[in-house]
Image (cartoon, rainbow, N blue to C red):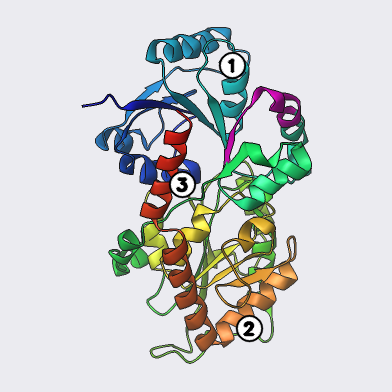
Amino acid sequence: MPQKKKIIHIIQSLENGGCENMLLRTLPLLQDFEHKIITLKTFGELTPKFVSAGITVETIHCRGFFDISGIRRLQKTVKEENPDIIITYLFHADMLGRLALCNISQTPIIPFLRTTYNHPKYLVARILEWLTRPLVNQYLANSEAVKNFYVDTIGVRPEKITVIPNGINIEYFNSITPDSELKKSLGIDPDDFVIICVANLHINKGHQYLLEAFERLRTSSTTCHPGPDPGSSPKQKLKLLLVGDGEERKKLEQQIESYRSKNNILFLGKRSDVSNLLKISNLFILPTLFEGMSNAIMEAMACELPIITTGINENKELIENNQTGILVPTKSSEAIYKAIKTILENPELRKNLSKNAKLFIGESFSLNKIATEWSLFLNNHT
């Protein structure tokens, strides 16, 4: 039996994030390869799930770019493993991979580009990407929009970037049923209309505009309730679930201190039951300023939720306006408010958007299809 080709995946940690969950869904399907994940900082909460799937995980406890001993541990581990390919994920791993490993072996080091950095806060990241691009012979990207960003803004030649999008397991989401006890535990009444946003609380996710729109719904003299679905109630209330955590949390909590809607806004922090939360929700909103290919949007589509998100190029690969969701401008609480009102007042539109979204995501981004693209790429580059 021929020996399996060895792939090393380097990432900051295996916390419960979009990139990490993409790996968890995908790597176990790539049975023709031997996978090992090296985390730079800590193991992370998803590590036991990777281990259960038969994937080795090791951490080197590197404290940062200037932790010389941590970098040496990374180099030593890679030399000992002698992989056929090294794939890096997210900014810290991308930089350390190309800077610390490029001279110690002939192994291809391939950054998997997961997002654009289309925000002033990330100017340094864009500069470092530009300065170090000559060290990279081949990239992966999770969307055409990310590829185009690196071509147009960073100056990478298009032939150096291969796009492999995220995949989604529709059957998994079909198997989950709405949990009334979960609703009850969150203080949500059976008839409440639940809006959910799944995103880390970072400035580029645009939560402030969603909160402004939600407050306007609560205080508007024409506050509307969902249209005449069977079982709807005139006492039906709007609830907003914010799933995720991050450095903007305190600022966002301060934003709503004087809001009349504040008791209907739940900051849930990091959750391990995101799919269950999606299943008890009625509308998904992501007011993001930039993305890569949003796993959160894909999961909401798989859960057959109507979607409101921003009309950035990254999202247009998933959402066709008024067909599989509603696209709004970035940084516009007014547009979000109007889109929510449209959804609330048009149950037939909600139904059509939801069905179209689930059909599209299942046909275009099935996990088995994406796993096949992975296998072809890995075989062609080893």
Vertical side of 255 occupied by 342: above or below: below
Rendered image: mark on residue 270? 3
Q: CA distance from mark 2 to mark 1?
A: 59 Å
Identified by mark 3, the residue type is Lys
Q: Position of residue 360 (x, y in %)?
A: 48, 69
Callout 3: SS: loop
Inspect this view and state whether residue 246 appears.
no
Q: Depth-wise, is mark 1 or mark 3 nearer the camera?
A: 1
Disc nearer the start of the sequence (2/1) = 1
Identified by mark 1, the residue type is Cys
Q: CA distance from mark 2 to mark 3?
A: 30 Å
Q: Residue at x 41, y 20 (%)?
A: 83
Residues at discs 2 and 3 in contact (Cβ within 8 Å): no
Rendered image: mark on residue 102? 1
Query: Which quarter of the rendering shows the N terminus?
Result: top left
Which span is picked out in magenta?
128-140
Viewer-proximal residue, 304 or 163?
163
Vertical side of 63 occupied by 370: above or below: below
Callout 1: SS: loop
Q: Mark 2 highlights which residue?
A: 223
Q: CA distance from mark 1 to mark 3?
A: 35 Å
